[in-house]
Image (cartoon, rainbow, N blue to C red):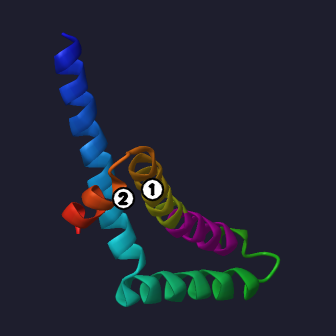
Amino acid sequence: ETGENEVVDREQEEALVKAGFDAELLLSDPTFTGVVNQVIEHTFSVFTGTTSDEADKRETAFMAYRGIADIVDTLRQRVGVKNQILESRPDTDDNNQEEQ
């Protein structure tokens, strides 16, 4: 049973590493970052451009901002997990080259 757990753990670890590489790729994509920045700028503009009686617009803009920020934070977390896994491996250089 220990062998099975090690295989499952290794498979889960590999899935996390792959997710980290995928997230890193997305975060480095200029189209993705451009869209993220555009959405953030738009939501900030809407938020700051509202009057005191437009609470609904401010709330909608804030929620849109929080949504995009959560997506970026999740992607960054995946990259961090990948880096931690790879750093904990004695053969990190070999694994890093295999994944790319």
Dot 1 lies on which element? helix
- Quarter in which the N terminus is drawn: top left
Is label 2 in contact with label 1 (beta carbons under 8 Å)?
A: yes
Residue 40 sits in quarter? bottom right
Left or right placement of residue 81 versus residue 59 in this view = left
Reply yes or no: does residue 60 show up in magenta: yes
Residue 51 sits in quarter? bottom right
The extreme right residue here reads: 52
- Quarter in which the C terminus is drawn: bottom left
The location of residue 57, given as percent across then percent down, is: 64, 74
Task: Name the magenta segment's main secondary structure.
Answer: helix
Q: Which residue is mark 1?
A: 83
Left or right placement of residue 31 versus residue 81 in this view = left
Left or right placement of residue 40 versus residue 50 in this view = left
Q: Residue at x 35, y 74 (%)?
A: 26
Q: Amino acid at mark 1?
A: Asn
Left or right placement of residue 9 versus residue 51 in this view = left
Q: Amino acid at mark 2?
A: Gly
Q: Which residue is mark 2?
A: 20
Instruction: Say above or below: 38 vs 57.
Output: below
Along the line of sight, the residue nearer the viewer: 82 or 33: 82
